[in-house]
Amino acid sequence: MGYLHCCGGLHKCRTFCLAPRQNYVISELDYLKSCPVCGHTVVQLTRVSADNNISVVRKVNKKAIDFFQKLKINILYEIKSTKEVLPRGSFYLNYNEYGVRKKCYSNLSALKIGLTENRDLTTAKTI
């Protein structure tokens, strides 16, 4: 899965590997069916030659659909990205940087924030 630039941002798209033609070593086709912002269809063909020269062909909307249909017979396979899962431990340190045990404030009924002393204002003496 690759990314195509459209409407000021990168959007996920499908990536296909094509059979290289002429003197190209690598050919890849990126296909964005519809941009989430503008709704355009975008196709981009990226080729690398034997001399490490990169050529890019980009088509939008009706021309993109025709270009994709034309190159569909040359598609070898779709490139799928694998999601890497990083190892994560379950260790949690209950002490802060000063060596004091962290307090849990999830029990809100135990908090004394906002409580004021109740006074009966009707019994106050007026002068």
Image (cartoon, helix red, strand yellow):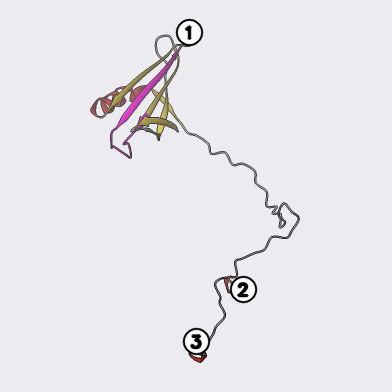
Which mark is first along the chain, 1 or 3? 1
Q: Is residue 40 magenta?
A: yes
Observer-nearest residue: 10 or 50? Answer: 10
User: Which residue is label 3 attached to?
Assistant: 121
Local crowd size for mark 2, using a 10 Å CA cut-off: few (<14), some (14–19), many (≥20): few
**Identity, as a three-letter code, of the amino acid under mark 2:** Ala
**Identity, as a three-letter code, of the amino acid under mark 1:** Asp
In this rendering, which labeled residue sits more in front, label 1 or label 2? 2
**Identity, as a three-letter code, of the amino acid under mark 3:** Leu
In this rendering, which labeled residue sits more in front, label 3 or label 1? 3
Residue 68 drawn at (x, y percent): 31, 26
Q: Which residues are magenta?
A: 31-49
Q: Say which quadrant the N terminus sits in.
A: top left
Residue 17 drawn at (x, y percent): 43, 24
Which mark is first along the chain, 2 or 1? 1
Label 3 close to label 1 by CB (< 8 Å): no
Residue 51's disc number: 1
Residue 110's disc number: 2
Marks 2 and 3 sit apart, C-alpha to C-alpha, by 27 Å
